[in-house]
Amino acid sequence: MAEGYVTTHVLDAARGCPAEGLAIEVWRLDGDSRRLTRRLTTNDDGRTDAPPIPRGELEPGVYEFVFHAGAYLDGALGPSDGPRFLDVVPIRFGVADATAHYHVPLLLSPFSYSTYRGS
């Protein structure tokens, strides 16, 4: 069994702090099908209490984290006057090595976001 796993960390770049209470969905993709594997919420450090994809569950393939940024931003900054520029932020990534640690952070503000493969 492969021992790789995936972690995430969400930072609120507008306020300069971890994004606490942000909901995340974890999806496994296979061709045209998507399967929801887990729902998580970030803790006070902007991380999840358990890895979104824990050891023993990671397989080569394509995954997607769906970050519910709009709901988080409404709570953190107050409701928007209209639709938020960013609402749901999907990050689709590929896993080639199921024995590796993949870290998929999100740096978030009301009008932009970025990600990278972290360590």
Image: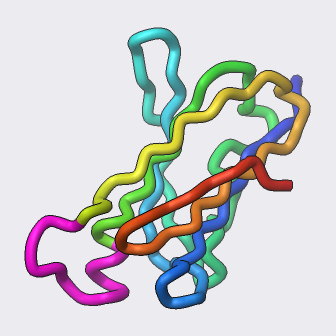
| Count of marks placed on residues | 0
Q: Quadrant of the C terminus?
A: bottom right
Q: Nearer the viewer, residue 113 or 26?
A: 113
Location of residue 108 with respect to 13 vertically, above or below: above
Which residues make up the magenta segment? 72-84
Q: Position of residue 39 (x, y in %)?
A: 46, 51
What colour-coding does the image apply?
rainbow
Q: Single out the residue that lies furthest toward the front.
A: 111
Q: Is residue 63 left or right of residue 118?
A: left
| Residue that appears at 73% across and 23% down | 59
Location of residue 40 with respect to 4 vertically, above or below: below
Q: Is residue 26 left or right of residue 55?
A: left
| Residue that appears at 59% across and 87% down | 17
Q: Position of residue 104 (x, y in %)?
A: 68, 51
Q: Nearer the viewer, residue 6 or 90?
A: 90
Q: Quadrant of the N terminus?
A: top right
Q: Is residue 114 left or right of residue 95?
A: left
Q: Say which quarter of the image contains residue 13.
A: bottom right
Q: Nearer the viewer, residue 43 or 67?
A: 67
Q: Say which quarter of the image contains residue 114.
A: bottom right
Location of residue 76 with respect to 107 vertically, above or below: below
| Residue that appears at 42% across and 23% down | 34
Q: Single out the residue that lies furthest toward the left.
A: 82
| Residue that appears at 85% across and 37% down | 4
Q: Position of residue 78 (x, y in %)?
A: 24, 88
Q: Position of residue 93 (x, y in %)?
A: 62, 34
The question of residue 20 being in magenta is answered with: no
Q: Is residue 70 left or right of residue 80?
A: right
Location of residue 35 with respect to 20 vertically, above or below: above
